[in-house]
Amino acid sequence: MTLEERIDQSETRVCTTVFPFLTNHHDTLFGGKAMAIMDEVSFMAGTRFCRKTLVTVSSDKINFERAIPSGSIIEAIARVYSIGRTSLKVSVEIYLEKMYEDGRELAIQGMFTFVALNQNKEPTPVLEGLNIDR
Amino acid sequence: MTLEERIDQSETRVCTTVFPFLTNHHDTLFGGKAMAIMDEVSFMAGTRFCRKTLVTVSSDKINFERAIPSGSIIEAIARVYSIGRTSLKVSVEIYLEKMYEDGRELAIQGMFTFVALNQNKEPTPVLEGLNIDR
Amino acid sequence: MTLEERIDQSETRVCTTVFPFLTNHHDTLFGGKAMAIMDEVSFMAGTRFCRKTLVTVSSDKINFERAIPSGSIIEAIARVYSIGRTSLKVSVEIYLEKMYEDGRELAIQGMFTFVALNQNKEPTPVLEGLNIDR
Amino acid sequence: MTLEERIDQSETRVCTTVFPFLTNHHDTLFGGKAMAIMDEVSFMAGTRFCRKTLVTVSSDKINFERAIPSGSIIEAIARVYSIGRTSLKVSVEIYLEKMYEDGRELAIQGMFTFVALNQNKEPTPVLEGLNIDR
Amino acid sequence: MTLEERIDQSETRVCTTVFPFLTNHHDTLFGGKAMAIMDEVSFMAGTRFCRKTLVTVSSDKINFERAIPSGSIIEAIARVYSIGRTSLKVSVEIYLEKMYEDGRELAIQGMFTFVALNQNKEPTPVLEGLNIDR
Amino acid sequence: MTLEERIDQSETRVCTTVFPFLTNHHDTLFGGKAMAIMDEVSFMAGTRFCRKTLVTVSSDKINFERAIPSGSIIEAIARVYSIGRTSLKVSVEIYLEKMYEDGRELAIQGMFTFVALNQNKEPTPVLEGLNIDR
């Protein structure tokens, strides 16, 4: 398998219906709740890519350009973006769909950095042990 | 768009990490929690297919053949299976991945039936208003 | 104690008020949430009956004949229905009450099958060690 | 129906398995979580008794005499205790069962006072409109 | 450090926005949810004061004099009130603010009693090992 | 009141015990959960400062320099950092305390930007209507 194929395979999707219990008093999704979804989906994409213990190191600047109203369906898609020696960056996009209309638009974009740890909780090479053609 | 393409497009995926707060005292995912995930993901697939108000009518027999241990990643995939006049059936499969190993296996399968409602909460044709080539 | 008395004693009840955070955008209880309640209450009835480790094997077809509106009180009642060698079936009914009116009606019915496990996680006889008159 | 029969009928039970996500770092049920269960079950018993809007006025002193370990089954039982003109008191007891052993013991006792409100949110007679033999 | 300074330092504050998912069908905060917040904040104040394992022994009578509407900000403030040999009392007050108006008012008051435990889960002196001027 | 006094008054604190249900399988607080706490506490500080409807516009880069283990107490402190015409920036710090030891250390720092909206959901001056000495 090439690196690109492994990245394709580890792409991770999470769809959620924005039900009332996820929304604030403006009837839109909490910013913080969106961030928690983005952290979880990018963690899964990174883990599926390298199959190693990952911890979140940082999130880049996140812009909330579009409010996400109650009654929408959102899809978060995370994909490995770049690979360092012991760390990797995962990009994550949240798309917004109206429930009763076709079409979708990009609502939020983010980038999370994770570090891979070995059993002693020390940084370990991300690609070690992976069967990747070079 | 053909019917088949519309079904492909409405396929819906939800990945979840089985963290401790989702598990019982055997350290495996609750049966009931798996059912709730299956209901939500199949609801989204059905809604994206017909873009109409859907309510759950029934779930067919569900077999829990494999326990899902804490620390797994699961992926629920829902896809429209058959279309009646005012109802539709959505099949849903839950795949189980070990967090630190490649590969996956089918863990749970289910089938949910939904009915489409109009604004008076009466059954309404599923395909009405959809732009489908015949 | 007879078998029938032991079944009576292990009957389990869970009342819940259907508050807004349990409902979808039609303002009715999620199908999946009802299934999770049914799994938990039938698990408790089965456990109280045999006092052994139980895991959910399957749920039979469930019909959601009546939507459960926000602001209702529901009562889930689970009762051992039949006993196999290493498994048992528990029936569960959900009754629906209006909050400000007497009377109730059956809203959902289900049947869950559990298997009893010993400490090696192997199937074990359900009735073993129970003090039941025959 | 006599008053006593109406009280019997409105008795309310909630069983819960004390799963890990309900427990603190001593692996026992949170005191605050037990209080929330007690408030909800006594609210339902009071509402079923008078079928009027109730709001919590006070809780009497609550003693937590017994820690409730993870992996227990608890049953909260609420019952109308006394009836004032526009208020009523509901007693609630929490019983503790080991999951894999017969028998139970009283773990927590409480008393909640509710006031009945009419549509203008003013106190209203508890017994008004109820069909009770005197 | 004097006792008074240590009490000042261990005072604990928790602000919460009363979002819809915390409210009942009167659109006000659940009594039980307020009690859970009070238990948690007083537990933290007590723990920060004595740095020992604490378990809740009792809550004194709690009056809910003011309903807390959805869309409010509440602040719970807990402070050690008195110190026994192996137990301590923590008072907790919940203040209510309108979101879009200055000013606040006291909404609920409570008093929680905790006992300090050593590693054998036996009561242990609260002040032992603390560096307090006398 | 001066601007500085108003900023002091609107500072907002949220203490939380990191119980098991908030942690991942490394037994540390989720990055995403920490972000959700940071968004909520900074939203409250901003709202108390300007008493206007705020929506999250962006979060700056967040570094998670220190893992937050289960069984810690964390305190999130949010404070208005700078004021634009229709937007304001709120800085938020999360401090980490061991439960059974005095002392604390800074664990995570962030900066959130909010915009103030009027009733037509258009940006509105942050300071309008506030009684601030200049």
Image (tube, coloured by chain):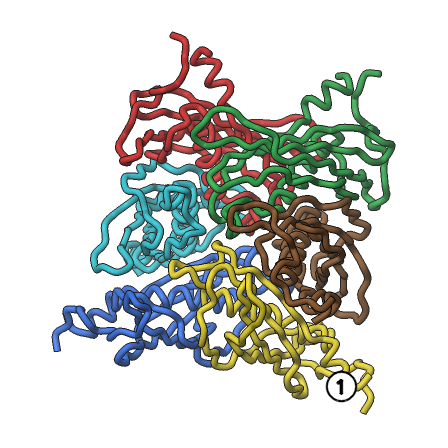
Chain colours: A cyan, B blue, C yellow, D brown, E green, F red
Q: Check the image and report above or below for C74 versus D21.
A: below
The reply to whether residue D29 is in sight is: no
Q: Which residue is outermost to the front?
A: D134
At 32% from the left edge and 53% from the top edge, which residue is drawn?
A77
- B122 sits left or right of D15 in the view: left
Instruction: Assign the N terminus of chain C to one quadrant of the image.
Output: bottom right
Tag 1 secondary structure = helix
- B134 sits left or right of C29 in the view: left
Packing grade of label 1 (10 A; few <14, some 14-19, many >=20) is some
**Residue F39 location, quadrant:** top left
Q: Position of residue F54 (x, y in %)?
A: 37, 32
Q: Check the image and report above or below for A51 versus C86.
A: above
Q: Which residue is outermost to the bottom?
A: C134
Instruction: Assign the C terminus of chain C to one quadrant of the image.
Output: bottom right
Protein chain holding label 1? C
Q: Position of residue B91 (x, y in %)?
A: 36, 75
- Comparing A63 with D54, the one in front is D54
Q: Position of residue B111 (x, y in %)?
A: 40, 77
The reply to whether residue C96 is in sight is: yes
Q: Return the residue at label 1.
A: C3
- A97 sits left or right of A114 in the view: left
At 41% from the left edge and 64% from the top edge, which residue is drawn?
B40
Q: Amino acid at mark 1?
A: Leu
At 46% from the left edge and 12% from the top edge, which residue is drawn?
F1
- Comparing D105 with E3, the one in front is D105
Q: Position of residue F53 (x, y in %)?
A: 37, 32
At 36% from the left edge and 29% from the top edge, which residue is drawn?
F113
Q: Which residue is outermost to the left?
A: B133
